[in-house]
Amino acid sequence: MTLLRDHDLARAFDHASDTYDRLTALNPGYRADLQRSARRLLPSGDGAGLHVLDLGCGTGASTEALLRVAPRARITAVDASAGMLRQALAKPWPRNVRFRHLSAERAARAGEGPYDAVFAAYLFRNVADPDGVLGTVRSLLRPGGRLAVHEYSLSGSALHRALWTAVCRAVVVPAGTLTGDGALYRHLWRSVLDFDTAPEFTARLTGAGFTGARALPVAGWQTGITHTFLARRAAVAERGAAAGGAGGGGGGTAADGAAAAGGTEGAATAGGAR
């Protein structure tokens, strides 16, 4: 099947946003895995002084995971689906959370960088140009800033590929068909099969200029199917002049934090009393 991309994918998420939000709310493992990845990204502490980009925030499950790990971090959360953002904004949020309606490709338009950390959950297999988005993310991070990608990315084992297909055929696609969102859930199935394996995405991060790229598994039946990818922008900015030239390149400082990203055009600041 042809995968959904860009506006078609955003519209599919718009249509599915209500049932998607309810299904993820009923799945404690889904939220626990997100929180584990957020904890792998962010340093210990309450997050005070950190600015984090939640890239592809959906209905806010990833944003909630970040807040549980770093409740005082400033979080900018972006997503390309207006419907998913409406679900997120219907929930109570503290004042340090801000939602923007932006695609990952346009995350820089939020105008709120640089970020100490970027968190991207279930995003990269859905973008048409992952290398371009990685370049955007790298440009938005402070020197030393960290990236965590929480994603369905198969290990490369035939067993894990077969397990994913079996789960999708038995549970995921039928559930999507019942809710009227069959195309989106077929996309979910096929997009995982077509996406980078964990070693391939780790290499993609290195090729995009990140350092220390590595993949960590999640627990349970998704071991070998879902991974947390961690990487960092180099702590020292690249030199702008060749050796022997008159000019000098700038140096950067190490950033304590890590990050998350996303977005959609328009902005909304969450108030705590809603």
Image (cartoon, grey):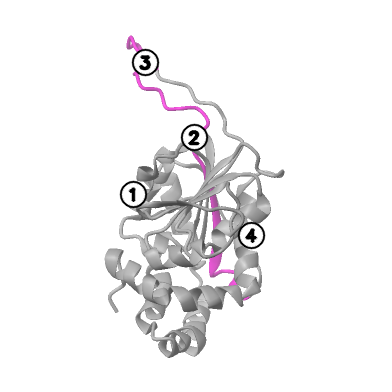
Secondary structure beneath label 3: loop
N-terminal-most mark, 1 or 2: 1
Q: Is residue 142 above or below residue 263?
A: above
Secondary structure beneath label 1: helix
N-terminal-most mark, 2 or 4: 4
Type of amino acid at the residue the image marks with label 4: Gln
How many other residues sit within 10 Å of disc 2, few (<14), some (14-19) or many (≥20)? many
Q: Which mark is residue 243?
A: 3
Main secondary structure of the magenta stretch = loop
Q: Quadrant of residue 52?
A: top right
Type of amino acid at the residue the image marks with label 2: Arg
Q: Report the span colored magenta.
A: 221-248
Q: Is residue 252 above or below residue 50?
A: above
Q: Which mark is residue 142?
A: 2
Report x, y in % for residue 115.
Answer: 50, 39
N-terminal-most mark, 1 or 4: 4
Report x, y in % for residue 110.
Answer: 39, 44
The answer for how far apart the CA atoms under marks 2 and 4 are is: 23 Å
The residue indicated by pointer 1 is 106
